[in-house]
Image (spheres, helix red, strand yellow):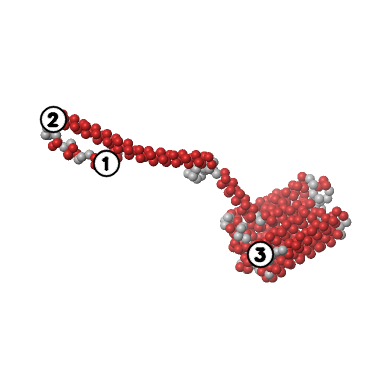
Amino acid sequence: MESLLPGSFPQLSSSLPSGGNYLGETNFKVGHSPREVQVYRCRARKILERQCVVRFQRHNSGFSVKKSTIYRENNAKFLVHAASGQPFESESGAYNPESTSKSVKNALDAFYRFSRPHTVIGTALSILSVSLLAIEKLSDISPLFFTGVLEAVAAALMMNIYIVGLNQLTDIEIDKVNKPYLPLASGEYSISTGVMIVTSFSIMSFWLGWVVGSWPLFWALFISFVLGTAYSINLPLLRWKRFAFVAAVCILAVRAVIVQLAFYLHMQTHVYGRPPVLSRPLIFATAFMSFFSVVIALFKDIPDIEGDKIFGIRSFTVRLGQNRVFWTCISLLEIAYAVAILVGAASSYTWSKYITILGHGILASILWNRAKSVDLKSKASITSCYMFIWKLFYAEYLLIPLVR
């Protein structure tokens, strides 16, 4: 209401004489009748009211212009966002499909790295390969077979995620040096998130093993759990990864012995209900994978020498040097391939003989050529070769069912 008073409008106030001079009685007492004085007063009041109205309209027009400008800007912004399909800035909580899709992709990528996919693939392939050794006739390839394989693979993969996850939880500081791309080391996962994941997957693994009712499967999970925990967890008399020989034995026990024997017995006794038999292919698989498991146990520490030195992990690489451990690994694999060729040559099945000899000969040649090209001063080159060793690991499990 104060804005409607004449004093609110400086121009109007300045344009009007003071009330005493303009409407004062002294100006009207001389030569003017009372009626004329009343007429002058009415005119003055009308002039004052007219100027107040004009000033009020000007005052409001400023707000109207601003309001119109704001409206036009908001309208233009609306049209731009409507045309682009993007949400308004003011709608901070609005649903954004692209943002949601990106978040899902990031979450899946983090879990993919956390699960250490090369070990997941190795576990799945090894169980499938060993399960094929239990097939004696064509009719064995039935829904029963696929159900048994699926049960074993699902339970083993969940235990695999527990083991690699626990290792990351106890190696966060080391991984910041050796493997900064892992979710816990990079900070993408909090420690509580890591604990939740490994706890959930270990429980689910044991639950599935118990529900299936296969004792070979359950014991394979239990022994893997015990060795995987003892390998990583930092408790008195544990954290066996600090001791090179014990660490290698842990990996050999799981990858070479438990995977071959326990999962074969799962298929042979639980799925098919047959008595356990140590067949020639099974013995070959166990022996060959013993070499391979030792190589993986030694080779995995070659690119990690920097972090292991800092945190007191006395691996063979730290103690003997990268060059010596590298060529020891290559030599062990070449010996394993030579033995495999001899086993193939002794086979009574012609098709198996040729496949075993040719397959292992090709793999041995590829390995040797790749080893000569590795730059042991480059961590990237060593890591690339380590992943190549895992590919040879996968290839071997494709050949094992064909050895007779």
Counting residues from the N terminus, which is met first, the one under dot 2 or under dot 1?
1
Q: Give the left or right position of residue 80, taking residue 290 as reference.
A: left
Using the image as rendered, state which of residue 200 and residue 322 is in the foreground: 322
Q: Which mark is residue 11?
A: 1
Q: CA distance from mark 3 to mark 1?
A: 83 Å
Q: Secondary structure at mark 3?
A: loop
Using the image as rendered, state which of residue 402 and residue 198 is in the foreground: 402
Residue 404 at least partly seen? no
Q: Position of residue 14 (x, y in %)?
A: 24, 42
Q: Tell me: residue 372, above or below residue 401.
A: below
Residue under label 3: 378
Q: Residue at x 70, y 64 (%)?
A: 374
Q: CA distance from mark 2 to mark 3?
A: 115 Å
- Quadrant position of residue 194: bottom right
Q: Secondary structure at mark 1?
A: helix
Residue lying farthest to the left in this orientation: 30
**Label 1 neighbour load within 10 Å: few <14, some 14-19, many 20+:** few
Counting residues from the N terminus, which is met first, the one under dot 3 or under dot 1?
1
Identify which amino acid the numbered label 3 is placed on.
Ser
**Label 3 neighbour load within 10 Å: few <14, some 14-19, many 20+:** few
Identify which amino acid the numbered label 2 is placed on.
Ser
Using the image as rendered, state which of residue 402 and residue 87 is in the foreground: 87
- Quadrant position of residue 402: bottom right
**Label 2 neighbour load within 10 Å: few <14, some 14-19, many 20+:** few
Residue under label 2: 33
Q: Secondary structure at mark 2?
A: loop
